[in-house]
């Protein structure tokens, strides 16, 4: 047992340190998985070919046959991640994202007098854009790529220090767990617990608002404090977006919002993520094809098709990359899950003398801290919790779904998380310079939201 614990800790440290040093998780995760295996008496070959890659096996907790590891996670999240990447790329290339941002910038930001007021409104504008994209079904990684130029332009015009741009890209951290959002958090809770996307609607919306209000004040206050100390903006090694952003033609705001609205409505009514995102992609192409950047010098139908295909090709590559980053961590978690050490740890948590929902929160938070992967944490914890507590009637599945969706967003964003590395890399800033506001926004505020959701459902269980 002691050697097994040491092995898991060492593997986790290797995984986290390697990711911190920008080592690809595509081969780092299986290496960490092998370390876990050999220190826990499991064949390295078996760990990689079965537990990491994934095979069909019987889940004793749910009495169902399932596929775990990388393969199982791909089956669970492929439509959402892949189609979400296509949707986000299309929204960016057709000018819809820029149209929404331009209107908010002109109406909310530049009309205010004074840099501090403009900074507050810039944070609010970014928060609204990111939440709109999240509610429209755009994946978090895709949202970052779509909004990064917007954040840089705002920071340049107002004088916001570049080290706060990563924090401005993480303002919608409460949206991924909100009711009716087409997110991996909700999708997996629906798939495992059989709940609806609007599970625990009222507590979920309350916590969403509390998290986002807290996030807004944290980010805006820290930015203004830095500006008062004389910090300003510079592009550094980043590309300049100002001229492109000001000259690019955009569609009408109402037209730009229609694909997002359609995705949200289809997902909320039909609860089909693939159908919703496909409809959004097709609608964006049909309504705004004239705004896509030209592909070469050709004209006519060939050029029209070419620029659409070029956008979809780039979106497909982005989707595949995001998919494998997420699933690699799930493979590592799959190896850990098959060790006696992990099962003993789970048994210890399940036996804690606290209410079942507190057990659920602790388990999910601990696992997501170890794996840095919400899909992996939900995939491991929810079947166990469902078989133990939901089946016995100790927890309402709708309540568990909403609390879990929020809890899995807490310690996901430690410094080695892919989203943290992505945002700081885009802004060309060091993690130690940018991480404090991101930590307060994405870890502390989501942790507050998790506890608040549990308290509301404990006091008013009928709201689940």
Image (cartoon, rainbow, N blue to C red):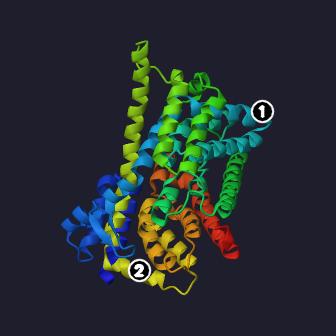
Q: Secondary structure at mark 1?
A: loop
Crowding at mark 1 (Cα within 10 Å: few <14, some 14-19, many 20+): few
Q: Is residue 10 above or below residue 70?
A: below
Give coordinates of residue 69: x percent, y percent: 32, 62
Q: Residue at x 42, y 47 (%)?
A: 79
Left/right placement of residue 385 relative to residue 155 reads: left
Q: Is residue 236 above or below residue 141?
A: above
Give coordinates of residue 169: x percent, y percent: 57, 46
Where is the N terminus found, in terms of image quarters?
Answer: bottom left
Q: Residue at x 62, y 44 (%)?
A: 132
Give coordinates of residue 41: x percent, y percent: 23, 77
Give coordinates of residue 433: x percent, y percent: 55, 52
Left/right placement of residue 244 relative to residue 422 reads: right
Sequence-wise, which precedes: disc 1 or disc 2?
1
Residue where numbered disc 1 is placed: 111
Residue where numbered disc 2 is placed: 345
Q: Residue at x 49, y 52 (%)?
A: 420
Left/right placement of residue 362 relative to residue 132 reads: left
Q: Residue furthest front?
A: 270
The reply to whether the C-beta atoms of the residues labelled 1 and 2 are less than 8 Å apart is no
C-alpha separation, residue under disc 1 versus residue under disc 2: 56 Å
Task: Specify whether residue 327 is in view.
Answer: yes
Q: Is residue 178 above or below residue 146?
A: below
Q: Residue at x 41, y 22 (%)?
A: 305
The picture quadrant where one finds residue 31 is: bottom left
Left/right placement of residue 407 relative to residue 68 reads: right
Q: Is residue 3 above or below residue 47?
A: below
Q: Secondary structure at mark 2?
A: helix
């Amino acid at each position: 047992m002691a050697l097994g614990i040491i092995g898991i800790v060492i593997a986790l440290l290797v995984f986290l340190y390697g990711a911190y040093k920008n080592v690809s998780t595509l081969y780092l995760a299986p290496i960490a998985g092998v370390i876990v295996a050999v220190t826990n008496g499991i064949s390295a070959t078996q760990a990689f070919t079965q537990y990491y890659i994934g095979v069909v096996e019987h889940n004793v907790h749910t009495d169902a046959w399932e596929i775990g590891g990388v393969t199982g996670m791909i089956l669970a999240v492929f439509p959402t991640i892949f189609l979400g990447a296509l949707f986000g790329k299309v929204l960016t290339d057709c000018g819809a994202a820029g149209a929404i941002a331009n209107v908010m910038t002109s109406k909310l930001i530049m009309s205010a007098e004074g840099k501090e007021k403009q900074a507050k409104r810039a944070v609010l504008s970014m928060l609204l854009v990111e939440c709109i994209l999240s509610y429209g079904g755009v994946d978090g990684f895709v949202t970052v790529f779509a909004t990064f130029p917007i954040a840089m332009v705002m920071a340049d015009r107002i004088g916001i220090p570049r080290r706060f741009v990563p924090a401005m890209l993480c303002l919608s951290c409460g949206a991924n767990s909100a009711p009716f959002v087409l997110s991996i958090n909700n999708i997996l809770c629906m798939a495992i617990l059989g709940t609806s996307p609007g599970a625990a609607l009222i507590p979920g919306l309350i916590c969403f608002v509390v998290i986002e209000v807290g996030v807004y004040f944290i980010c805006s206050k820290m930015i203004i404090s830095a500006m008062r100390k004389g910090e300003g903006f510079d592009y550094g090694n980043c590309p300049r977006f100002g001229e492109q952003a000001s000259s690019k033609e955009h569609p009408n705001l109402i037209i730009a919002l229609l694909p997002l609205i359609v995705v949200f409505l289809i997902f909320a009514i039909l609860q089909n993520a693939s159908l919703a995102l496909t409809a959004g992609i097709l609608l964006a192409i049909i309504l705004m094809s004239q705004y896509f950047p030209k592909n070469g010098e050709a004209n006519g139908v060939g050029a029209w098709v070419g620029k659409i295909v070029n956008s979809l090709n780039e979106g497909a590559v982005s989707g595949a990359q995001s998919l494998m980053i997420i699933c690699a961590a799930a493979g590592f978690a799959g190896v850990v899950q098959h060790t006696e050490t992990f099962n003993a740890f789970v048994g210890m948590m399940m036996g804690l003398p606290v209410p079942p929902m507190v057990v659920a929160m602790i388990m999910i938070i601990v696992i997501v801290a170890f794996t840095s992967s919400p899909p992996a944490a939900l995939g491991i914890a929810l079947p166990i919790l469902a078989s133990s507590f939901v089946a016995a009637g100790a927890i309402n599945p709708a309540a568990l779904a909403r609390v879990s969706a929020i809890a899995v967003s807490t310690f996901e964003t430690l410094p080695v998380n892919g989203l943290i590395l992505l945002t700081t890399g885009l802004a060309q800033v060091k993690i130690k310079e940018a991480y404090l506001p991101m930590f307060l926004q994405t870890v502390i505020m989501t942790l507050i939201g998790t506890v608040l959701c549990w308290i509301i459902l404990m006091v008013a269980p009928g709201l689940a």
